[in-house]
């Protein structure tokens, strides 16, 4: 997979980099996992500023290999695995830098600019491109989902993974439009979604297609299940006092992270205010460091608007 030269040369801004780095210990040599390597922004800063024994990078997107090769020229203590982070334990067993426990594991759950800004990937509703949205070796793409799934299934996907309140309207209009002509590109789909909203809808907040595109991406790449599996495995890989640092960008992911931290720290927890509190009967293995999630500063949001929804949570192995 190739990356347009303009994107290859474009400066990458890791979200909440200063805040993430502030939690990494600088008084000892550490082993670290960057579980969402992307454009290598976190890894580059960490290798430059900290005493790193070995850094294991993981990313399912083949594009990450390009940025890894550039970073590898300056640092020989980094190793990349092009795979899903749900396989984190299995991947590490094949690492030439294998160690049983790690001091820091980082997840940045957002899309990288290289993915959003490349029209050929189909992630953006503001750029014309094919309906793809695959991050790696997913069996489905957005074209197949949009043009073959029945109306109820589409509505369920938009509601469950996008929390889209107009999910049924959108699904109905997609089915009506595809009977006339196959829906082939992102802008075509975006227009159908926009027309599904009532005239009174205030589009100044977020674009009408935001939640539907999010839902498609999450469904196609099975992102929520991937995260749940990866969190459990990551906790097992942490050394005593090791840190699990997670940046999320939407409520579904953040809810999973929050519930996991609460559950593992022995708190009474619930995944919804509509459900009763649940007593945690399992062992207490984590201590929550960030009592409330950290948010990006106004300065960062002004310079990188995509950071505005970020939430940073940190827990420590006990």
Image: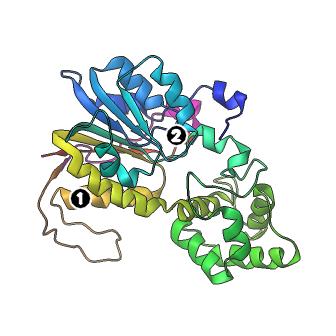
The stretch of residues the image draws in magenta is: 287-305
Q: Tell me residue 301's x, y (percent).
A: 53, 35
Residue 99 seen in render: yes
Quarter of the image that includes the N terminus: top right
- Quarter of the image for residue 189 reads bottom right
Q: Secondary structure at mark 1?
A: helix
Residue found at x 53% / y 59%? 221
- Quarter of the image for residue 140 reads bottom right
Q: Which residue is mark 2?
A: 307
Q: Tell me residue 246's x, y (percent).
A: 36, 45
Q: Marks 2 and 1, Cα distance to the nearest angstrom?
A: 25 Å
Q: Is 94 located above or below residue 51 in the figure?
A: below
Residue found at x 61% / y 63%? 216
Residue found at x 54% / y 65%? 219
Q: Tell me residue 311's x, y (percent).
A: 41, 46
Q: Which mark, residue 262?
A: 1
Q: Is residue 214 magenta?
A: no
- Left or right of 158: which side holds 78? left
Q: Is 78 located above or below residue 157 in the figure?
A: above
Tell me the crowding category of disc 1: few under 14, some 14 to 19, or many 20 or more residues within 10 angstroms, Cα based: many
Q: Is residue 297 magenta?
A: yes
The numbered mark, 2 or 1, whose residue comes first in the sequence reads 1
Of residues 215 and 299, the one drawn nearer to the viewer in this rendering: 215
Q: Tell me residue 38's x, y (percent).
A: 51, 38
Of residues 246 and 101, the one drawn nearer to the viewer in this rendering: 101
Tell me the crowding category of disc 2: few under 14, some 14 to 19, or many 20 or more residues within 10 angstroms, Cα based: many
The total number of labels drawn is 2
Residue 13 seen in render: no
Residue found at x 57% / y 77%? 156
Q: Is 119 located above or below residue 183 in the figure?
A: above
- Quarter of the image for residue 53 reads top left
Q: Secondary structure at mark 2?
A: helix
């Amino acid at each position: 997979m190739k990356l347009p030269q303009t994107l290859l040369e474009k400066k990458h801004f890791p979200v909440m980099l200063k805040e993430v780095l502030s939690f990494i210990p600088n008084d000892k040599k550490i082993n670290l996992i960057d579980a969402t390597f992307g454009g290598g922004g976190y890894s580059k800063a960490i290798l430059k500023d900290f005493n790193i024994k070995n850094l294991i990078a993981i990313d399912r997107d083949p594009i990450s290999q390009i940025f890894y090769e550039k970073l590898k020229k300056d640092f020989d203590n980094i190793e990349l695995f092009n795979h899903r982070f749900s396989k984190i334990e299995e991947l590490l067993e094949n690492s030439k830098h294998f160690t049983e426990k790690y001091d820091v594991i980082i997840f940045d759950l957002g899309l990288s600019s290289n993915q959003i800004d490349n029209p050929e990937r189909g992630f953006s509703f503001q750029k014309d491109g094919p309906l793809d949205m695959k991050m790696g070796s997913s069996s489905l793409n957005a074209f197949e989902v949009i043009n073959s799934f029945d109306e109820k299934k589409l509505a369920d996907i938009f509601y469950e993974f996008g929390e889209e309140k107009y999910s049924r309207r959108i699904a109905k209009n997609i089915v009506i439009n595809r009977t006339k002509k196959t829906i082939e590109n992102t802008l075509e789909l975006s227009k159908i979604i926009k027309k599904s909203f009532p005239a009174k809808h205030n589009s100044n907040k977020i674009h009408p297609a935001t939640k539907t595109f999010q839902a498609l991406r999450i469904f196609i790449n099975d992102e929520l299940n991937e995260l749940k599996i990866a969190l459990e495995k990551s906790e097992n890989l942490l050394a005593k006092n090791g840190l699990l640092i997670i940046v999320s960008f939407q409520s579904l992911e953040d809810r999973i992270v929050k519930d996991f931290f609460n559950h593992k720290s022995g708190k009474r927890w619930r995944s919804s205010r509509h459900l009763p509190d649940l007593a945690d009967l399992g062992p207490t293995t984590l201590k929550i460091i960030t009592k409330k999630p950290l948010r990006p500063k106004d300065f960062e949001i002004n310079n990188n608007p995509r950071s505005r929804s970020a939430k940073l949570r940190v827990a420590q192995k006990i």
